Image: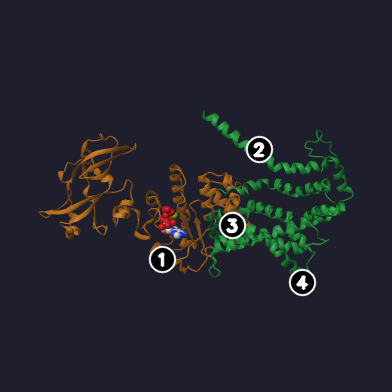
Chain colours: A green, B orange
Amino acid sequence: MVKKKRLLNNAATYGMLLLWALIVLFPLYWVVTTSFKEIGDVFRGPRYIPWVDFIPTTEWWYNIWTVQRRMLLGPVFNSLVIATSSSLFAVIFGTMAAYGLERFRFKFGHMKNKDILLWIVSQRVMPPVITALALFIMFHFAGLLDTKLALIFVYIAAHTPIAVWMMTNFISQLPISIEEAALVDGASRVQVFFRIVLPMVAPSIAVTFLLCFIFAWNEFLLALMLTGGRTQTLPLLIAAQHFQRGPQWWDISVLVTISIIPAIILVVSLQRYLIKGLIPIGK
Amino acid sequence: MAKVVLHEVTKKFGDVTAVDRLDLKVEDEEFIVLVGPSGCGKTTTLRMVAGLEEVTQGEIYIGERPVIDIPPKDRDIAMVFQNYALYPHMSVYDNIAFGLRMRKVPNREIDKRVRQVAELLGIADKLKRKPKALSGGECQRVAVGRAIARHPEVFLFDEPLSSLDAKLRVVMRAELQALHQELKTTTIYVTHDQAEAMTLGNRVAVMRDGVMQQYDNPQTVYNNPVTMFVAGFMGSPAMNFFPVRLTGEEGRLYVVNSGFKLKVPQDKTGKLEGYLGREVVFGLRPENLKTPEMAHDHNPEATLEARVRARAPLGDELLIHAETGGVELVARLTPQTEVAIGQRIALVAEMEFMHIFDKDTEEAVC
Ligand SMILES: Nc1ncnc2c1ncn2[C@@H]1O[C@H](COP(=O)(O)OP(=O)(O)OP(=O)(O)O)[C@@H](O)[C@H]1O
Ligand SMILES: [Mg+2]
């Protein structure tokens, strides 16, 4: 009786998960299959299953690899450099700020730690459009328009709050006595941070880095405002396809598929940490 | 090695006074135990000595040095935490070596000391493991190893054995004792287990609500508790307390309640004269209540009658819970004693071990 109920429960759980997976994965499936469709198959109503509904072609992939490779490599390189370096700094600043907020008591005027944290996070609540124009003017005067540095700066500013928020949460779960043991053992605060805290939150740092990276990798609006021909990022390139050549869904699908690959590689290689980083730290 | 002195140390958390004007002097090479019920301020005291908690008022000296303004890392103390607080990302070797590395001890010396300590504590074959792969007892040893490898001036232990099972606790207790014999490092040891306090300490400091009650060697604390609290806290099962009236007849003193009338030994009467005719609390430990056969004594002036309410045979002894004059008592009898629940039995009180406490101040009168 109990067993039967458990079975039913399991079935329901897996059923829901399966349904959710289908909903999440379908757009992905659609993009990937479209990148293998003939022009005719794209426009003549929905075609779902390769070799059943349509005969796949590698023409577009081949095209990108040969004719359009040069067009692609620049933005991919830009995106990689910008996303990686900005996320790195966001995570470094975020972790340090989070540690400070968790372990020391601050007071700025009437603001205590919780208020400071909320204030930092609130920077992220504001829609980026609001700052876009101001940033454009700022970077114009600084002579940084159409440089990678401009976007790196902006992304660091935009993603540090997320990193602070996430890392505060992770660090608050660390048992404080381990750090106290290190203090008594003769370590300074700085040594405690680098030799004890950092290794313990490494999985969480990986998770935070991944999130910042994906945000930066996908970011469109600020990139549109602040970059030019030399520093175009991947999302801009993909959008530009549409503007320049009309709805060439096959090419766009190839580019989109390519743009997803780094995130997938990161998630898979960090998977071990992802699971560890998302669940509370034990023992 | 050094002595440790706490002078009028007070710690407040907001409105809560966790430690109240504590005076504590630990001699060089001494092993003292801070004992008391949960929340009495033991951990707070230890953390102030370690420098992990700021002192609200008072002064702490390690050696001759006032340490209030010295950060933990420069106090030359080592602490073993209740949950061990091992560094989870480091091997056992690195855990023990960490403090030495922080103090820039040369590598060869570090290696020598780590192996020495591991040998001493029987964890030499586990040096490469991470803490996660260790049992509770092994973790405890690593935590101790980490403390002793540094040869600090003072050891601080915060209930290091409380998460071990009873058997292992007894083993580790003996090991800690042997360790102190060998190293002679001044030690402050915190526990809420009175048996642990009795076995380990050269001296025992009993605390209650942030206030030190008594600070003396274990035997004195046990035999001559200065307050009802200490009397009740030290010893298991706890001392029996009876509300009684002190009466005098023909130069003799008696403690009287509705269940019994017992004669106070002659040598105790001096201190009690001021209490003649007044209500006091009469205390007697369970082992000082015996059956007439055990006591070889039928003296009616030392005998009370009680009705047995429960019996707990523990193998080497038999505890009985009984009631006399409306008061619960516990007696520790030999396991052969035949008693049934509901039965009335005679118990001989060994009055030379009696205690009398002032009813209002709860302080010991004799
Ligand atoms: N950080 C803190 N903030 C506020 N109150 C605290 C803090 N630390 C301890 N206290 C209070 O101080 C008192 C003493 O606490 P302490 O931890 O020293 O007790 P303890 O004797 O070690 O008890 P236990 O045996 O349970 O460990 C308690 O009432 C506790 O609630
Ligand atoms: Mg405690």
The disc at residue B9 is: 1
Ligand 1: does it lie within 8 Å of the C-beta at label 2? no
**Mark 3 to mark 4 CA distance (whole Å):** 35 Å
Do marks 3 and 4 share a chain? yes
**Mark 1 to mark 3 CA distance (whole Å):** 34 Å
SS assignment at label 3: helix
Mark 2 Cα within 10 Å, few/some/many (few <14, many 20+)?
few
The disc at residue A141 is: 4
Residue tagged 3: A168
SS assignment at label 4: helix
Q: Is residue B228 visible to the viewer in this orientation of the structure?
A: yes
Which residue lies at the image location 26% right of the left edge and 38% below the top edge?
A: B309
Q: Residue furthest front?
A: A45
**Mark 1 to mark 4 CA distance (whole Å):** 61 Å
The chain ID associated with circle 2 is A
Q: Nearer the viewer, mark 3 or mark 4?
A: 4
Q: Which kind of residue does numbered mark 4 sit on?
A: Phe
Q: Which kind of residue does numbered mark 3 sit on?
A: Thr
Do marks 2 and 3 share a chain? yes
